[in-house]
Amino acid sequence: MDKGIEIYTDGASRGNPGKASWAYIVVQEGKIILNTGEFAGICTNNQAEYSAIIHALENAVEKGWENIAVYSDSQLVVRQINGEYKVRDRCLQERFARVKKLLGRFASASFTHVPRSNPFIAIADAKCNQILDAMEPQPKQQNNVIVPLPPEKMDLGLIPIGIVHSPYKTVKEAPHQGSQRTDITTIELFPEYEEGLNGLGEGQELIVLCWFDRAERDVITVLPPGSTKPRGVFTTRSPARPNPVALEEVVLVSCKGRFLTVRGMDAIDGTEVIDIKPALKRMK
């Protein structure tokens, strides 16, 4: 009898896409009965999150567990599996299909989002980092100055409020400055935040704060486009920075329910939105 089988999953990618790993913890009646993970090759963080879930489900099928509860700190992945969110990223669609196929092998299976501060998620996260640390050579000095990431991540409690549906599917496709383009982007807010849009008007200038999860986070100097001299990352608008918070200045084209159509974004498809603010009126 599979009493109280809980599975906590995590995936990590350094470079996003970059070297990645997955891990999961199986807990039964409050005790860890399995702590495992592996190198996932080169992929994005979301792909690694799905890999962790797939491996965990495959193991559960092998064990004959029929009733499981899965927990992940990826709100996006949990929402997709629960049917609250469409899987638009082609790279995730295959993994999503594998998850759905595996779920047909269980009598019951639930998916719940939990914060990174959850103690079991923290163990899975540590396992991912341990795997990646073992794969990393000593960093070499290049054009960019490399700085190590802190061994312990601080949980600041950031919660995505929505996601970007963009014509730009990869980092290479995205322009250096979205304000210089006329392409249309859609921002989809999660249902619980829809009321926060009350009062927005067409033509309004907005500041959209995004989390560029696929940006490099281990550089402190960058070489700006057209420049031959490296500059400190905090003097540039480069997406590569220790905390990849992007400030997008956009114009609201339309607002229908929880969907905003905007012009002027350079975020790629699937980017998480963490805040929206009205732009400050500039003094003439």
Image (cartoon, rainbow, N blue to C red):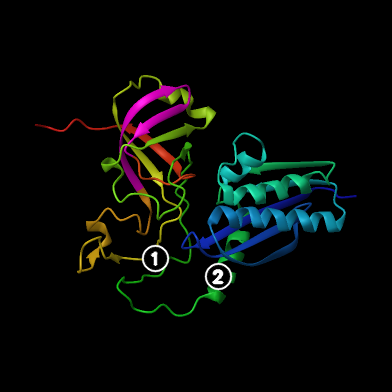
Q: Would residue 270 appear left or right of 146 to someone viewing this image?
A: right
**Viewer can see residue 158:** yes
Give whichever of 147, 121 is nearer the camera.
147
Mark identifier at residue 218: 1
* Spot occupied by residue 137 in the image (x, y as percentages of width and height): 48, 79
Give whichever of 209, 29 is nearer the camera.
209
Q: Would residue 242 appear left or right of 4 to someone viewing this image?
A: left
Principal SS element in the magenta part?
strand
Residue 216 lies, with reference to residue 167, above or below; the image says below
Write the residue at 70% across / 46% down.
Answer: 97
Specify the quadrant that holds the C terminus.
top left
Mark identifier at residue 132: 2
The stretch drawn in magenta includes residue 257: yes
**Viewer can see residue 119:** no
Residue 282 lies, with reference to residue 180, above or below; the image says above
* Spot occupied by residue 100 in the image (x, y as percentages of width and height): 73, 44
* Spot occupied by residue 214 in the image (x, y as percentages of width and height): 45, 55
Write the residue at 44% across / 80% down.
Answer: 138
Rate crowding at label 1 as few (under 14), some (14 to 19) or many (20 or more) other CA atoms within 10 Å.
some
**Which span of residues is magenta-colored?**
246-264
Residue 118 lies, with reference to residue 251, above or below; the image says below
Q: In which quarter of the image is residue 119?
A: bottom right
Q: The disc labelled 1 sits on which kind of residue?
A: Asp
